[in-house]
Image: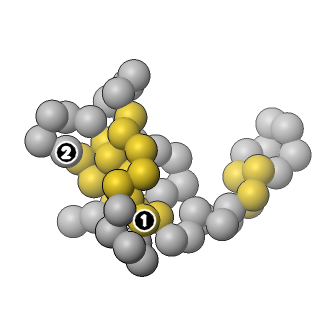
Amino acid sequence: MAKNGEPGKGRNGAVKGRSQFLGSNGNWIKRDTKTGRILDQKTSTSQPFKGIRKEH
């Protein structure tokens, strides 16, 4: 899994084992790639999660 770097420099590497997709309600939804289980839903903004690959 990705680790947060020094303050101000951001994340080191990509987040592994996770993917995201745009749900029918317009929210980005985070999923575990191994189990397919939904982990989180982003409701505050229309921006995707940072550092997590998108499903197509």
Spatial CA distance of label 1 from label 2 is 15 Å
Q: Quadrant of residue 56?
A: bottom left
Residue at x 12% of width, y 41% of height: 24
Task: Give the quadrant of the N terminus.
Answer: bottom right
Left or right: where does residue 14 sit relative to residue 19? right
For disc 2, the marked residue is: 23
Q: Is residue 34 above or below residue 6?
A: below
Q: Residue at x 38, y 73 (%)?
A: 35
Which numbered mark, 1 or 2, is in the foreground of this view? Answer: 1
Q: Quadrant of residue 47?
A: top left
**Residue that lies at the very extreme toward the bottom in this rendered image:** 34
Residue at the extreme left of the image, as rendered = 24
Disc 1 crowd rating (10 Å Cα; few below 14, some 14-19, many 20+) is: some
> Does residue 24 appear to the left or right of 34 in the view shown?
left
Horizontal and vertical percent position of residue 15: 58, 63
Q: Mark 2 is on which residue type?
A: Gly
User: Considering depth in this image, is 48 or 32 the residue closer to the camera?
Assistant: 32
Q: Residue at x 32, y 47 (%)?
A: 29
Q: Residue 14 appears at what percent x and percent y?
A: 60, 65
Where residue 49 appears, x then y in whole percent? 46, 44
> What residue type is disc 1 on?
Asp
Label 1 belongs to which residue? 32
| Residue at 52% over, 47% down | 50
The x and y percentages for residue 45 are 38, 25
Above or below for 55 versus 27: below
Secondary-structure class at tag 2: loop
Taking depth in this image into account, of 54 and 8 the one nearest to the observer is 54
User: Nearer the N terminus, badge 1 or badge 2?
Assistant: 2
Q: Is the residue marked by circle 2 packed among few (<14), some (14-19), or many (20+) residues within 10 Å?
A: few
